[in-house]
Image (cartoon, rainbow, N blue to C red):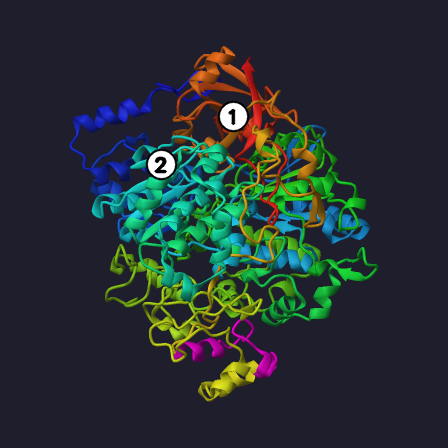
Amino acid sequence: MLRKKTNGVARRPQRTSILSQAAETSVDRRSFLRGSGLAIGGLAAIAATGGTVTKASAATAAAGAVDTVKSVCTHCSVGCTVVAEVQNGVWVGQEPGWDSPFNLGAHCAKGASVREHAHGERRLKYPMKKEGGEWKRISWEQAINEIGDGMMQIRDESGPDSVYWLGSAKHNNEQAYLFRKFAAYWGTNNVDHQARICHSTTVAGVANTWGYGAMTNSYNDIHNSKAIFIIGGNPAEAHPVSLLHVLKAKEQNNAPLIVCDPRFTRTAAHADEYVRFRPGTDVALVWGILWHIFENGWEDKEFIRTRVWGMDQIKEEVAKWTPEEVERVTGAPGEQLRRVARTMANNRPGTVIWCMGGTQHTNGNNNTRAYCILQLALGNMGTSGGGTNIFRGHDNVQGATDLGVLSHTLPGYYGLSGGAWAHWARVWGEDPEWLAGRFQKVTGADGKEKSLQNLKGIPVSRWIDGVLEDPENTDQPNPVRAMVLWGHAPNSQTRMKEMKTAMEKLDMLVVIDPFPTVSAVLHDRTDGVYLLPATTQFETYGSVTASNRSIQWREKVIDPLFESKTDHEIIGLFANKFGFADRLFRNIEMDDENTPNIESTLREINRGMWTVGYTGQSPERLKMHMENQHTFDKTTLKAVGGPADGDYYGLPWPCWGTADMKHPGTPNLYDMSKPVAEGGLTFRARFGVERDGENLLAEGVYSVGSEIQDGYPEFTMQMLMDLGWDGDLTADERAAIDAVGGPKANWKTDLSGGIQRVAIKHGCAPFGNAKARAVVWTFPDPIPLHREPLYTSRRDLVADYPTYEDRHDYRLPTLYASIQKNDFSKDYPIILTSGRLVEYEGGGDETRSNPWLAELQQDMFVEINPRDANDLGVRDGAQVWVEGPEGGKVKVMAMVTERVGAGVAFMPFHFGGHFEGEDQRSKYPDGADPYVLGESTNTAQTYGYDSVTQMQETKATLCKIWAA
């Protein structure tokens, strides 16, 4: 058995102790979990008490009652409830939430060990700065003053865009919202978070297909699926509890499970049909399936006629993808794809599930749209058991995305236009001129002056270019000089050799996190680095949005440990230092001078987030749902009786109107089988009413109870007046509408919610009733196309399927053809891809600092096919070098396995703390180094960014491997 090592000494095998005790004592499962606080898969691990499970005596009971507190796991996006047991302010045990509709009393390895995440000994304990090459303890006051003074000097010298504010999917919704608002008040759109590098291509592709860029149904609704198609996802490891829902459909409905992946994953092991294909050929694979569907007339013709625009153009492209051509490009046999197509056609409704295997590509937006088009062709949208169930990564990456922690939009996907800023200025009660004055102005190529307020900022995937790129080539006056990594693992990003250089060029590097992260050690800086200890989410409270759009309320489990502070208090400290706290928090109640109240912050969110319906989820309603989880049906998510009767669990957005409207939430997007007032919905009329003379609105179909029995555009005050429905508005609603434009006001800008309320009263969706569009005329590829990766091993396909010409977007030049024209395949013949492990999450700093998880996986490794290993002279378990074509290399352990096909290698992305063979443990602050260190795959990963969102390419580059 592998054992943790501390200072070179193996710890005693503690699990043997507790298991032997359990064998001698009659202990049921719940008692065991309570005593241990942990249950890793089928493996139990001990708690801080040594793992003893004994009956409480009167004496021990008198020492302090044990309180139970409901929280939500801080790892993936399933949203599992954690029931923490707290005694005298100490978190002493935990159980999974047995009443939760999401985890149903289950935990994965990570969820079962979150107590250690909060109480972990490897956390940052107090503010620190690097001075003369040494880490020194400082006070919070000194830290805020020194950082603040340095930033204001940079702002004065180079402008607000020279400070980059990198946020987090680990913030709760209220903190995420405050973070984006804070960046606006600082005067920059150089703000972003992890969603950029995990599902930005999903959000862009899906939103531009049918209106919203999120999971359409839910984990629970998969229970109703008659077929399950997973591509580019490995939920068995990345979202283990979600697999409970998948397997329920497989067993209950005899639903065939189809898994398409370049790697035979643990999820693929459950599949009825496993399709191995070459990394980076998703569009070709999906078009190959659609070829059979169209060839045999298996598409849903009536659904397409009434609810889809542009499918004829898709058919023309798909016709080129004969089984022979698909096999040439993807490697997947045509007969197998015919079987997949027939299975999906014969088992409707079927659901399509994807994760980062599909998104992290230079043409990731094409992949996600192709997945959507497959579902549109089969008529699987807007129905229970169907939909596109997009599994998001971090626990609140959906919420942080919704709340606008992005360089290209304000909260609620309003964008950065003048109208968007005007809307949020009204919500904030802010002077728009003052807000605009916070931003720099630049002279464009056309000689006209424009404000950076309306220009997309640099995305997190490219922040290193914001530091290193010649300003002459960028759309901002000066380089990034200060970097704030606030809850972000830098080793989750590619091009780490260049990142090291960028970190060393900065004037200042600030890390705000419960753990020091790889940001503390990657560089060779001796000064100008600050580490500020943030609390975990178990030491604060607030709302968090699961992947299915349900919003859950976390209660605080324990008070902040050590000298850590909550993220919203740290925002308050900086806002006070910069002199705009009074303006930032003018409409938000304060718990103290620096700490905005969470409930009050959510109410401000409710006042402004009309686009996606974050308006009906008041703190009171969310808390009531958490308190009454047991009343919600575990499949429909609908409450049966009780105080939440009729609501859907977590009020999944859109939850229309104000909280007083008591909209129940929308469990399945675009489902016209129920009234909008009861959670039904149409496709959004987001793209106009006609295109090239063709109707873009729905044809003769509408939601149950709709008084407009056809397609219709989005609602405005003028539309209410034309329909004669404006008389249903109250005097207060009419006054609020008049204040924001009268007849020009619409469902997104009306702060009263009156337009939404009246539209729904008449059975209509506030955002209209349109067709989904299969062709996105605003994208580089209106019809999704296969394009070869920049670093491709198939030079024979480049002429037929070239990448894009070099482009300029998000303030920066982006290279495509100028890289692909070079043949790297002779020197770097193996395709390199990456992914997750069940034991760790994200960059791995939290989970590799958790002793229970660290014990399970101690070595970074590369999976190599036996044929490749034998050709290279590499043995299983041996150390090897893996080098990418840009020169970055990593030294890792070889795992020789047929999980990967010949010519493909795989590495997990959770490791850090080694860099090109160098162990960097000594560079961490004392006692804050993770138990497990290892090379980051992203040191060897290469340049490559999506043409729409700047998503990084991590799934299809090249490498060479040799014995170390």
**Residue at image location 31% in from the left, 41% down from the top:** 257
From mark 2 to mark 1, how far is it between C-alphas? 41 Å
For label 2, the SS is helix
Q: Quadrant of residue 137?
A: top right
Q: Which residues are magenta?
A: 738-762
Disc on the earlier residue, 2 or 1 = 2
Q: Is residue 910 visible?
A: no
- Left or right: where 473 falls relative to 203: right
Q: Is residue 655 magenta?
A: no
Q: Seen in the image, is 47 located left or right of residue 466?
A: left
Q: Position of residue 508 (x, y in %)?
A: 71, 40
| Crowding near the residue tagged with mark 2, few <14, some 14–19, many ≥20 C-alpha atoms within 10 Å | some
Residue at left 22%, top 45%? 254
Question: Residue flagged by tag 1: what amino acid is it?
Answer: Leu
Q: Nearer the viewer, residue 140 or 487?
A: 487
Callout 2, which amino acid?
Gln
- What residue does disc 2 label? 336
Residue sitting at x 71%, y 37%: 528
Secondary structure under badge 1? loop
Q: Nearer the viewer, residue 458 or 809?
A: 809
233 in relation to 929, above or below: below
The N terminus sits in image quarter = top left
| Quarter of the C terminus within the rendering | top right
Residue 311 versus residue 100: which sits nearer the camera? 311
Residue 799 is drawn in which quadrant?
A: top right
Does the magenta run of residues contain 761? yes
The percent coordinates of residue 35 (x first, y second) are 28, 37
- The mark found on residue 78 in the picture is none
Q: Residue furthest right?
A: 447
Tell me the residue that label 1 is attached to. Answer: 933
